[in-house]
Image: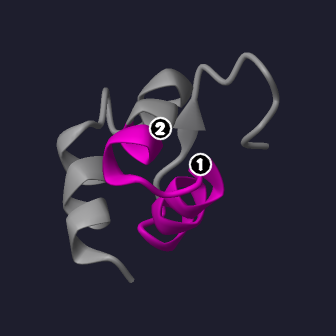
Amino acid sequence: MNTKLEEKIMQSLVNGKLPCAVAFKIAEEMRVVPMSVKETADELDIKISSCQLGCFP
């Protein structure tokens, strides 16, 4: 796992969840594909919220 990515996700939680728009922003900032953010969030048992495009079911 990417510790820096984990830390960024943990710092970005809203009510214990990671908003979809924030997940995409993290991916861009960390220069990883959005699916890497989702997979890391899954490993941390964090749900993606407010997903409008259905990218993170």
Where disc 2 sits, the SS reads helix
Residue 34 belongs to the span the image colors magenta = yes
Q: Looking at the picture, how far across and down is residue 6, in whole percent?
A: 29, 64
Can you say whether 49 is above or below 40 in the image?
A: above
Q: Which residue in the rendered view is the most extreme toward the front?
A: 31
Marking on residue 4: none
Label 1 – label 2 distance at C-alpha: 7 Å
Query: Which residue is pictured at 58% across the width and 66% down the height?
Result: 39
Q: Looking at the picture, how far across and down is residue 56, in whole percent?
A: 72, 42
The amino acid type, in three-letter code, at marker 2 is Ala
- Quarter of the picture containing the C terminus is top right
> Camera-side residue: 25 or 18?
25
The residue indicated by pointer 1 is 34
Can you say whether 54 is above or below 26 in the image?
A: above
The amino acid type, in three-letter code, at marker 1 is Pro
Q: Which residues are magenta?
A: 26-45
Quadrant assignment, res 50: top right
Q: Looking at the picture, how far across and down is residue 22, in whole percent?
A: 41, 28
Tag 1 and tag 2, C-beta contact below 8 Å: yes
Residue 51 belongs to the span the image colors magenta = no
Q: Is residue 51 left or right of residue 15?
A: right
Query: Which residue is pictured at 56% across the width and 63% down the height?
Result: 36
- Quarter of the picture containing the N terminus is bottom left
The residue indicated by pointer 2 is 23
